[in-house]
Amino acid sequence: MALLTGWAAFLVTVATIGCIYGLLTLGLNVHYGYTGLLNFGHVAFFAAGAYASAIVTMPPPSQVTNASYQIWFNLPMPYAFPVSLAAAAVVGGALAFLIGLTSVRLGTHYLAIATFALAGVFSDVLVNEAWLTNGSFGMNNVPKPGRAMLSADVWQLSYLIFAAGSMLAVYLLLERLMGAPFGRLLKGVRESEAAAKTLGKDTNVVKLKSFVIGGMIAGFAGGVYAHYLGSVVTAQFVPAVTFTVYAAMLLGGAASNTGAVVGAFTVVAFQESTRFITTVYNWIQSTLPDALSGVLPALFGPLPNNPSFIPSMRFVVIGVLFVLVIRYRPEGLFGDPSEIQALGEED
């Protein structure tokens, strides 16, 4: 008998995606919340980790339809799962190091433009280097750890527990790190880079370390994501992912790890709830009296049945959340107003 049906299956899926986005938001919070680095290329680290984790465990291309990649390691699962996640974190951190070397010296707005452009270049590399990434077809046979030994429902629940445990471990690690002198140094650089320099601190090195830590967390999130979906395709790693993570961080509160996690779950829940817009529309239409049955079609036309309607509504939902946060609680649900002032957002 199936354990997960209807709402239970939906909630488990949303919770798992929420944990993965929680990891992503924790990584971005190290960059922007604690160090003040305006990074608009966060999705590149996420993608790098996902592809690295996939390559470590992918079977030979002869066993995969439409496969043309030339590098694979085919390490056996589930024993290779920790290895693939470690590879994801290392590759995410290495990419962050390379991007950070060329961009952390830039000012806030220039850094945002540079990271956005570099993420775009990295996306083009993923599409064009088919020998490594299988191009636009992506890698569609990424092994799911333990799936062969467990039923579908048990595997879903087990993976949720793993994702939640991973997010909790990263959360506790960051809480300890940010409460240590290194965390206070990050905030010091964020609040006054000139003052940190006068105290003899190499602020570029400090910002580079922050960049690498956040990149490693995003890369690790990519590995968890790849093995959850069982595929990695370039279309999954678009700039909208970065802006969704920013929405989660600002909603929860910058420089708050608790806020990052709560914000990620809130944004994912709102995003996924758009799936039910068509159901709600049809239910309202069925309950209206005959005299008013033409009101909804007159207002919305065929939009609820349009294939692009639901994806578009997800951007609308995020936009509404942004407006509500800025209007009523600019420091976020768990943020500190003094942190917003330190980030210079009060202007």
Image (spheres, rainbow, N blue to C red):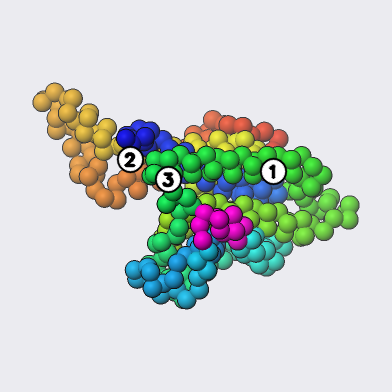
> Is 226 placed left or right of 166 in the picture?
left
Near mark 1 (Cα within 10 A), the count class, few <14, some 14-19 or many ≥20, is some
Residue 88 belongs to magenta span: yes
Residue at 50% over, 37% down: 265
The answer to which of marks 2 and 3 sits earlier in the sequence is 3
Disc ID at residue 150? 3
The answer to which of marks 2 and 1 sits earlier in the sequence is 1
Contact check, label 1 and label 3, Cβ < 8 Å = no
Residue 299 at x, y percent in the picture: 22, 37
Q: Which residues are magenta?
A: 76-89
Question: Mark 1, mark 3: which one is toward the viewer?
Answer: 3
Residue 257 visible in the displayed image: yes
How far is mark 1 from mark 3, CA to CA? 33 Å
The answer to which of marks 1 and 3 sits earlier in the sequence is 3
Residue 96 at x, y percent in the picture: 64, 61
Q: Of residues 239 and 98, which is closer to you in this image?
A: 98
Q: How many marks?
A: 3
Q: Is residue 216 above or below residue 258?
A: below
Residue 127 at x, y percent in the picture: 44, 70
How far is mark 2 from mark 1, CA to CA? 34 Å
Q: Secondary structure at mark 1?
A: helix
Q: Quadrant of the N terminus?
A: top left
**Three-letter code for the amino acid on which mark 3 is drawn:** Leu
Q: Quadrant of residue 310?
A: top left
Q: Which residue is mark 1?
A: 174
* Residue that sits furthest to the left in the current view: 290
Residue at 42% over, 52% down: 148
**Three-letter code for the amino acid on which mark 1 is drawn:** Leu
**Three-letter code for the amino acid on which mark 2 is drawn:** Arg
Residue 23 belongs to magenta span: no
Residue 129 visible in the displayed image: no
Q: Quadrant of the C terminus?
A: top right
